[in-house]
Amino acid sequence: MISRFFLASLYQTVMYLMKINIYDLRYDEKITRLKFFSLFAIARGIRLLIVASALNQNDHEETTSQMHETPLKNALIMGASGGIGYAMAERLATDPGIDTLVLCSRRALSSPPLLSLQSQLAAAGKQCWLLDADITDEASLSALTGRLRKDLQVIDLIINTAGLLHSKDLAPEKALEHISLHAMQQVFAVNAYGPILLAQSLMPWLKARRPVVFASLSARVGSISDNRLGGWYSYRAAKAAQNQLLKTLAIELARRNPEAIVLALHPGTTDTGLSRPFQANVAQEKLFTPAFVAEQLLNQIMQATVEDTGSFIAWDGQRIAW
């Protein structure tokens, strides 16, 4: 069997080549597009070889040492109408193993892209629920729980992609004088309180004695040890708070459901509305498309084991210091 180390190195090389072709791909150059999707097909093939190698070498090892291979039949995405959330929904919609997609956002039922995706999945014989839910509102989350309890006994994957960096009324602070209590409360409500309130509302599924993944988008700027530039007080602190809350959740779930995995994920700078006002100084090769980020993050989720629970992981698999 080919060395798993060699395969992993080859996989990372191919993914890097995909990354440096992202910028040209955005301009729809046919040759670049062909190159990108050829590399994508090669990467998927290598991943299959890695899985096969792992299965061959670990037939008699403990489950916790193997790749996470539980079929993901039912998945829920919070923030599904956003750039990364929708890209993840599109990617999961193509997964033959997925039976039910639950797509949530504040205005999911009036989102044309989500309604279109729902129709496509219905035509393919799959279920796609669109549910209006506000991650910052406990009553809204309680209503979501009640709706899910009626018809969905199992949730295999929960992904939170909701985030707030700026809006019409707020912007990241460049200096201490720019801090506003009201703005800080808004940023914390979405980026810190929201993910843990979502986890609390979905605890009946998280504590069930079966495999389940809870993954939430954090950000590298939430790393305290990595903070070298300062600024962005509210956003940095809110993401750091989310990281602490998710780490604490992972510890609790390790006792209540040893098969649960909790992950904080860094997507990198993605070409969405959240980052658009701040892209001027981002190198083009470091500005990713939502589709690329969705694929990368889902790869990290699928490769995670219970030994990874409570980890802070970047889109390329690097562990980020708290």
Image (cartoon, rainbow, N blue to C red):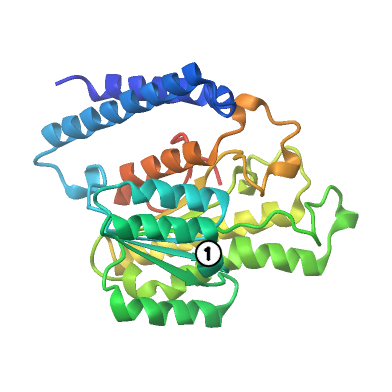
Q: Residue at x 65, y 68 (%)?
A: 189
Q: Residue at x 56, y 69 (%)?
A: 135
Q: Is residue 222 visible?
A: yes
On the image, the x and y values in percent for residue 44 come to 30, 30
Q: Is residue 247 visible?
A: no
Number of other residues with Cα within 10 Å of mark 1, as a class: few under 14, some 14 to 19, many 20 or more: many
Q: Nearer the viewer, residue 223 or 17?
A: 17
Asked where in the image residue 252 lies, by quadrant, the reply is bottom left
On the image, the x and y values in percent for residue 87 come to 48, 47
Q: Residue furthest left?
A: 60
Q: Residue at x 38, y 22 (%)?
A: 39
Q: Residue at x 51, y 69 (%)?
A: 109
Q: Is residue 188 left or right of residue 35?
A: right
Which residue is identified by label 1?
195
Q: Is residue 75 left or right of residue 272?
A: left
Quarter placement of the N terminus:
top left
On the image, the x and y values in percent for residue 193 come to 59, 68
Asked if 267 appears above or below 176 in the picture, the reply is above
Q: Nearer the viewer, residue 257 or 214?
A: 214
**How many numbered dots are placed on residues in this image?**
1
Asked where in the image residue 35 lies, by quadrant, the reply is top left
On the image, the x and y values in percent for residue 167 come to 75, 58
Asked if 200 appears above or below 113 in the picture, the reply is below
Q: Is residue 318 left or right of residue 203?
A: right
Asked if 223 appears above or below 77 in the picture, the reply is above
Going by the numbered disc 1, the residue's amino acid type is Pro
Q: Secondary structure at mark 1?
A: helix
